[in-house]
Image (cartoon, grey):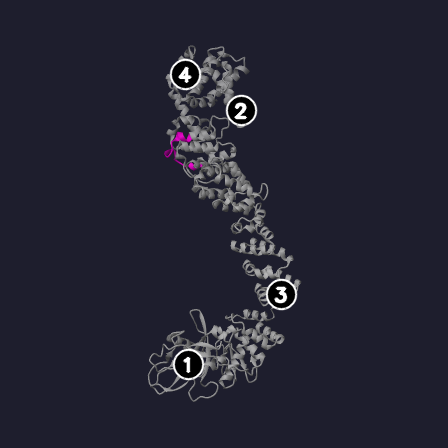
Amino acid sequence: MDSIDIGWALVGKKPGLYEEYSVIAASAGPFSPRQFEKIVSSSTPGNPPPPHENGPSALPWVWFDHPQIRGVTYVGIAIREWSPHFDATNRPIVFTRYFCVSLDDMLAAGVSYADFYETVREETVEWECADPLSQPTRTLPVRRGGKPAALATESAVAAAARLLEGAVVLLNGPGEMTERLNLLDAVARMLPAGAKAWLFTGTWSDNTSLNLSFGRRARDGDVALDLRTGHLDRSHAGDPSPYERALLQLIKRKGEPQVTEHLARQTDLRTRDPWAAEAILQDLDLLKVAVEAARAGTLKPEMLRKLHKSGDLDFVDAFARRQLLEQYLAVATPADVIRDAALLRAHWVAKLAPRLEEFARRQQKAARWTEEEIVGVAEVARRLGLAEQVMRAVVGMDTPERAEVVLAVDILGRRPEWLPVLGSVVADAKVTAVGLAARLAKHDGGLDGELAAHLDRAGENTVWQRVAGPYRKALTGPQGMFTNRDVAQLGHVDEAPVFDLVAVVHEARPERIGEVLDAVLVWLRDRIDQGLPHRWTDLSSLLSERHLPAADLLRYCTGLPPLVPLSRGRDYRRALAECALSDGILRATRIRFIDAVAGELGTGWSEQIEFDEVLLFFQWVAGIGGREQIVSRPLVDTIAGEILTNRALLDSPAVQLWQEYLANHQEMRRLFEERRAGIRRAVDVPWIANEIPKWGSSSSEALRRFLAKQKIPPDAWGAILVEVMAGQVANRVAQPHELVARLVNALLDHGFGSGPPEAVARPVAFDSAVQLDLAAFVLLRTHPHIRLEDGATDLARKLRAVQETLGEVAKSLEKKEPGLIKKAINTVIRSSDGERREGRDE
């Protein structure tokens, strides 16, 4: 550039007035008058000396600063000098002419401080005009004023190095302005050219913060360079800095002209950074530095980038090139590799293939890249002939968080040149294949696209095939065909695709979500004893009414509160019971379920839900009356606790079915005993027992009508049967047990108005009276010598003695085989009666 654009201002006073110093003339840009004034006042190197003073501190003063506006950095020159004018107090007026040029223009034109001064030195500014504060900027031809300064290289280097960390004061300098400016340039030339963005320099400094200036003495912390003796006072600076040492060594090897030309080209470094400045020095000897850095493990990608740009990398032998690229791949980021694709293609060595694979694995393991970076690196690898190797390294790191890999595969799968590679690489990469199936399923026709077709053909029974099959069946197969077996196929691969499938179907085919949830809930139920996946509770928001029982079974069994209470209704309770009684539910799991439901009821639950309905539900799930009965202590405690809270519940017919279990509860046993005692007092047991043989001698129907008319409570039948048996024996009936057998069978069939047969059968079968009945048979068969004339009272005593022994035996037998006593009683009674009633509900 032969010319530069200049903004300017004049700071001073108008003659004869009582005014403060201000901008009295200025160009319309780049700064406003107020900004110009602030720039000059904030950078001033001190107060001017008296007009008559001579020597180095006398005016004119020249200094340089670097103001900024709207992101543009300028270099300004201030020239302060005496004017021929006086103010109202007859004091001489100082004028400061200020000129500024953009740093970019100054560097592009190669303008030094001395050149800048020479360019504007003779420029006059008009302040007595119509509009002095909005005058045009100026375009001035560059005048070169710089000349070599009489400053030793070592001194210039030492001063420049110090400027990167502190300030330098030049002592005993020449008096002539141009010589001083040449000395400032001599020091500045030993820094990267961009340093003008932060340098404050001046031809004189009194007490300001200029970091390179002439002065009388050094301030605390400054380094002083005596230009007369060449002595550099380092008392405040310490040993030479790395920059100083590196610069002197480089000048010694390359020569000062080559080094200063190199520094003059470094216009981009515009920060006060010693390490970055030192790195710039290395660029001049970069090939040697890079090779040494590669060996030491300190290579930076930027070094290779500069060598490639300069062409120096073309002249490196194969061994050194391989060494450089190996270290490059060890420190490069994915962004580096993508940016340097041309460099890698131009200088690639075949033996570097494992290093690129290792690079991909390292990035994936550390989760350092995005899908765009994976795609970019993959494309670099493809152009190097390493597409398959690098993608295997990427998808081979099977870790749970692989979203970026799946996205990258999806992107690459839309490029025809990648389809054969991805088909062979991804089909058996578990996590990637699983994630890709879910992603493609979201695209319309994604599972039928080109990428999916290549994956289908990649092999037999691959992860892809085991995952894509259920996806296709759920999304596009015939409705009603998706089952828990399809879910299990997914689950064998991993738990994640099961829930991914639910999410995909809910989003893409919401009309099919119910069918899929049915299958998933069955799958979860079948594996409830193995532990459920942690994501299963995410399904709650998708469930419809029909799914609630199956979901609540899982929640009860895993310690979670149900989605709906047991009071939801009988249909819900029956469905919940059916789920709990499903094949595959282990006994321990059913016990856990029953206990959880019982525990969820809390106290006073019969006020919210009908008592008999709850007992009916527990009858279903506990198998009361079935082959396998499950009645746990917590369940008994729950039912007993509610009855003890509200004793009116004891009259519920449903309680009779639970009496044998509730009798194991201490307080309930006491309650039953009190109730039986009350019933016996309320019912004329001897009279009824005496009347029964009379009616029993006639037809069974007559006996039934008689007993139904008496409305005998179920709990009274034990005492009645004992009295009947004792009476038969006392009356020397040949077969005293026959009437008792008929009574028991009739009770099991009809109940005789005491309630439904099932409500009467249980207290009859398990009451102590029946144990006495059995004791009578045992006594008669094992003691044929018994004297029937002993009478009913004495016989009853003997029967009770046998009963006590049988009771102990019964407890032991019941633990080994629940229901054994009942079976024994019915067998004895029915065989004695001569009737075989096989298949009857026990």
Asked whether disc 1 touches disc 2, contact meaning CB atoms under 8 Å apart, the reply is: no
**Rendered view: 451 above or below 62:** above
According to the picture, the residue beneath numbered tag 1 turns out to be 97
Q: Earlier in the sequence, mark 3 or mark 4?
A: 3
SS under mark 4: helix
- The foreground one among 254 and 517 is 254
Q: For the residues marked 2 and 4, what is the alpha-carbon distance in whole angstroms?
A: 30 Å
According to the picture, the residue beneath numbered tag 3 turns out to be 314
Q: For the residues marked 1 and 4, what is the alpha-carbon distance in whole angstroms?
A: 137 Å
Q: Earlier in the sequence, mark 1 or mark 3?
A: 1
Magenta segment includes 187:
no
Asked whether disc 2 touches disc 4, contact meaning CB atoms under 8 Å apart, the reply is: no
Is residue 557 in sight in this rendering?
no
Q: Position of residue 107 (x, y in %)?
A: 50, 74
Q: For the residues marked 3 and 2, what is the alpha-carbon distance in whole angstroms?
A: 101 Å
Label 3 crowd (10 A; few <14 / some 14-19 / many >=20) = few
Amino acid carrying mark 2 in the image: Val
Closer to viewer: mark 1 or mark 2: 1
What is the chief secondary structure element of the magenta stretch? helix
According to the picture, the residue beneath numbered tag 2 turns out to be 809
Label 4 crowd (10 A; few <14 / some 14-19 / many >=20) = some
Q: Which residues are magenta?
A: 599-615
- The foreground one among 579 and 318 is 318
Closer to viewer: mark 3 or mark 4: 3
**Rendered view: 776 above or below 224:** above
Amino acid carrying mark 3 in the image: Asp
**Rendered view: 423 above or below 782:** below
SS under mark 1: strand
According to the picture, the residue beneath numbered tag 4 turns out to be 686
Closer to viewer: mark 3 or mark 2: 3
Q: Position of residue 816 (x, y in %)?
A: 54, 27
Amino acid carrying mark 1 in the image: Arg
